[in-house]
Amino acid sequence: MLTRHLLRLGLLLVLLPRPAIATMVDAPDIDSLISQSDYIVRAVVKAATPEWREHAGRRYISTKVELEIREVIKGAPPARLVLDLIGGRIGEEELVVEGLPRFGVGDDQILFVHGEQRKMFPLVALMHGVYPVFRDAKTGQDYVMRSNGRPLYSAQDVSLPMTTPTAAQQQNSAARPMTAATFARQIRNRIAAQSPAQREK
């Protein structure tokens, strides 16, 4: 029988230094999301391998996510990019972290990633640093979603709470989500507009 352990985000964050908590939970604006990222990539999940780990004398499940980088938008990520994410399933034991996205083989996503200094929490602002890409079978276009499955219509919308409808949705119910190419271009434009000190992050 499957034993599922649900770990609420508030409990997870007790492992973090206090100054990091608000940064990781609150939805940052796009410029903050960019500046906090050591690299931003579009990547496809090649493998997701759960493993037992230990912290402060307690065992937990963590999943090693191996990524194939399709596009580098910011920074110089390692050729073999691997994220170590809390949560996963081993046999009949499963650890689910409330609010955090799950990764499956073949998932195509735009990711905002911390460097080596954040091995336990590599995604910038946790769920706010993950933007799944889906392909419209009819048009062949790649569109961007937020990590909860809601469409993303503008880079500025990343700062909205996950459940808040965007202005584009409210004004036009037929509005199309942002394409992956447009999102990447808007990110690059924001980087180009940053000061040299910000770009050196």
Image: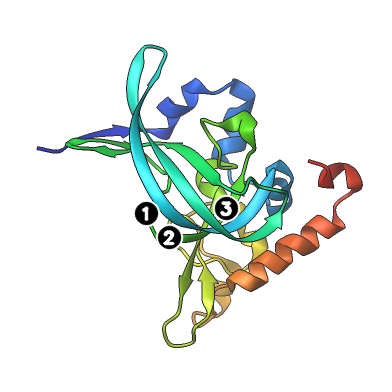
Crowding around mark 2 (Cα neighbors within 10 Å: few <14, some 14 to 19, many 20+) is: some
Residue 134, horizontal then vertical, whole percent: 46, 70
Q: Earlier in the sequence, mark 3 or mark 1?
A: 1
Q: Which mark is residue 111?
A: 3
Q: To which residue does mark 2 refer?
A: 107
Which residue is found at the position 65% from the left and 52% from the top? 40
Left or right for 31, reference 141? right
The answer to which image quadrant residue 176 occupies is: bottom right
* Pointer 1 with pointer 2, Cβ within 8 A: yes
- View extreme (left): residue: 1
Q: Secondary structure at mark 3?
A: strand
Tell me the distance, in whole angstroms, between the alpha carbons under discs 3 and 2.
12 Å
- Residue that lies at the very extreme toward the bottom in this rendered image: 138
**Residue of label 1:** 104
- Whether 176 is drawn above or below 10: the answer is below
Label 3 sits on what residue type? Leu
Is there any visible trace of residue 102 in the rendered image? no
Q: Nearer the viewer, residue 106 or 85?
A: 106
For mark 2, give the secondary structure: loop
User: How many angstroms separate mark 3 from mark 1 (CA)?
Assistant: 14 Å
* Amino acid marked by disc 2: Asp
In the rendering, at what x and y percent does residue 73 appear? Answer: 69, 58
User: Badge 3, how many Cα within 10 Å: few under 14, some, many 20+?
Assistant: many
Visible residue check, residue 162: yes
Q: Residue at x 37, y 33 (%)?
A: 8
Quadrant housing the C terminus: top right
